[in-house]
Image (cartoon, rainbow, N blue to C red):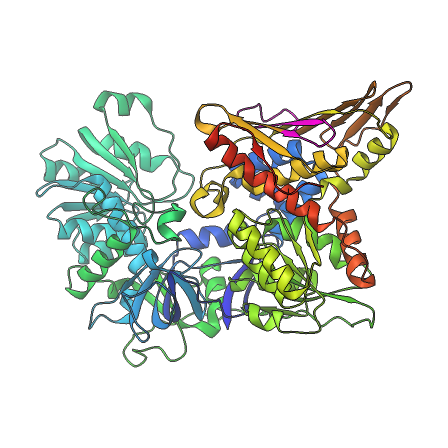
Amino acid sequence: MRQVVQNYKSGELAVLDVPVPGCKAGGVLVRSAYSLISTGTELMKVSEAGMSMLGKARSRPDQVAKVMQSVATNGVPATYRKVMGKLDSYTPLGYSLCGVVEQVGPGIDDVKVGDLVACAGNEHALHAELNWVPKNLYARVPDGLAPRHAAFGTVGSIAMQGVRRGEPQLGEVALVIGLGLIGQLVVQLLTASGVRVIGVDPDPVRCELAERLGAAACGDPASAAVEASVAELTGGLGVDQVYLAAGGGSNQPVELAAQLSRDRGRVVDIGKCRLDLPWNAYYEKELDVRFSRSYGPGRYDPEYELEGRDYPIGYVRWTERRNLACFLDLLSRGSVDVEPLVSHIADFDDAVETYQSLKDGDLKAVAVLFRYPGHPDQAVEAEAPVVAVPAVKRGSGKAPTPARSAKAVRLAFVGAGNYATSMLLPHLAQRDGVELSTVVTTTALSAANAQRKFGFAEATTDLDAVLGDKSIDAVFVVTRHSSHAELTRRALLAGKAVFVEKPLALTEDELAGVLAAVEESGNDRLQVGFNRRFAPLLNEARKRFGARTGPASLRYLVNAGRLQHGSWYLQQGTEGSRFAGEGGHFIDTASWLLEADPVSVYAVATSGNEDLQVVLRYPDGSTATISYVTTGAPGFPKETLDLVADGKVLRLDDFVRASVYGRKRWVSSRLPKARDKGQSAELAAFIKAVRTGGPMPVPLESLVATTSATLAVQAGLVGGAPVTLARAR
């Protein structure tokens, strides 16, 4: 299928051939009929992509702050790879469409194949021929409503949520600043609510359009006509509410809102405009400033948007999906009219040229639609001419097929997220004797990006085809934690060597399923991504420390830090606890240094389980204490480790420096620009084992023992007592 994309680094726009997204449980596969270009949000993104790197940084200071924190935590090279990997990737465009249900995933019973639905979401309602859309981000289109009108559903929901935040009352007067697409819809929704509306925009054409659609008066913000209209309609008291639907860097909208509001009026920010509030003006009138968050309650909540968990109507009357359905209902009953907003309908084939003409200003438009082949109302839409622009080269999304070496190890990747593309694939793409055969993802664009950047021969969403391909030697599982055990089990049963990122499993049942697959298939070719034991600096320090004769004490401080809101690591209901996800790293490192597997685990936590203390006991009496904390200072090193035994001390400082104290003192040279945590060496060891048929880099018994110990932490927290581990060397 084809999809509109943009490279944020170069600004290139393209229509790529990408794999068809998989139809997962809890959603539907939708074939697009029409998708809407948001001439505000999308063009802002397109314009940002055309900026220099400095311009991009200035426009997104929030992202710059994240980069600086990543440098402090992970070092310059790792951060550079991660940032450039994100920038030099194709990103999707679009978030509002209407289409026909082509396939229904498990758990969906409210629509069927052939139904017409409106879809929302900047990850699900994209400018693409096919999209997978979760349940709470689509709504069935009422009978008789034209698909091109239903494609306005998402932007209509944004406008509707903004109006709801303003709490309009019958007979009130509202001011709408900015009469672009959202502003025009806000005008109509307010008018339908019995509110008299005054519009503000420097474009006289948009002012005239708003008046035709119900505004009492409109004018330029610099003209006296707007102030006069407000005085006339309010008796000089000022408007009851102001809706900021403008963009740009001017502070004029905020200042005008204060000037024309009544005492204790409401100001609602819907767009992305400058908000330097003039304190005296807002204080003296005690203005109520409110923000409207996109489509409504549920936005940015992964449990609502991705898992389909609705909010009870008695507690949250208007959610994203209910707003979407409500707007479609208003359209079908004629309470809102979007036809006058349609400036142009372009064939999907002309998507790149259409964006370019909008960006260059050759096409002046409020709303532009893409029409897809075979759309339902092909014969009835009106079109406006587009000024011709030079054709822009489209990308195919296909990487050249690399020459295959007879001795090459053929790899398939299941998952191509940040970790895979920044920490694993860069090491594999240039390695001799390795062929990147196939990348499998559930989203089409991530597979296409990985194929383009790393030279995979194929990109697909069909896992079964990969597991059935006898020419593939090994499968990398680099997906979300909840899928690791099942994907590993299936790959082992298919006879593949498996490299699975941590964790191997989130429950004892999942671990048992993996071991059952090993027993059934006789295939124990498994490696878990416990890379720290392969770190060169730690290996050198261990060698300098030498053999020990007595028990050891190990202390491992992990300054994990807080996660950002919205991180999928916080989805404990499906992805397990944070420690269950990454704690195996530290347990494995301790066990490797102590040359044994733990026999018991004791865990305690601070109030709220924010910080964990995990004590591991080993067969020879050695102990390891892992302090996994989230409340520390972000500027402090992430990982520090001390190993004490036989009158010697080994010290590791965040993989940038190590030292050993004994009869002689050894201190490594400091590595200020890099933190080699062992990924490259680990991958080399795995590839060698696959190629030669030799033993896996880490014995299966050790992988299982580490996983069991990690899982035992939660049991220990619940039971409040040490947990004895059944498996130990």
Kindly report the secondary structure that dominates the magenta region of the rendered protein: loop
Up-down relation of residue 725 to residue 154 (above or below): above
Up-down relation of residue 131 to residue 589 (above or below): below
In the picture, residue 519 is in which quadrant? Answer: bottom right
Residue nearest the viewer, comparing 224 with 594: 594
Q: Position of residue 10 (x, y in %)?
A: 61, 55
Q: Position of residue 358 (x, y in %)?
A: 44, 61
- 23 in the magenta segment: no
Q: What's drawn in magenta, residue-wise? A: 616-638
- 630 in the magenta segment: yes
Q: Quadrant of the C terminus?
A: top right
Q: Position of residue 139 (x, y in %)?
A: 28, 62
Q: In this view, which residue lies farthest toward the right?
A: 664
Up-down relation of residue 375 to residue 501 (above or below): below
Q: Position of residue 537 (x, y in %)?
A: 81, 35
Identified at 65% across, 39% down, the residue is 585
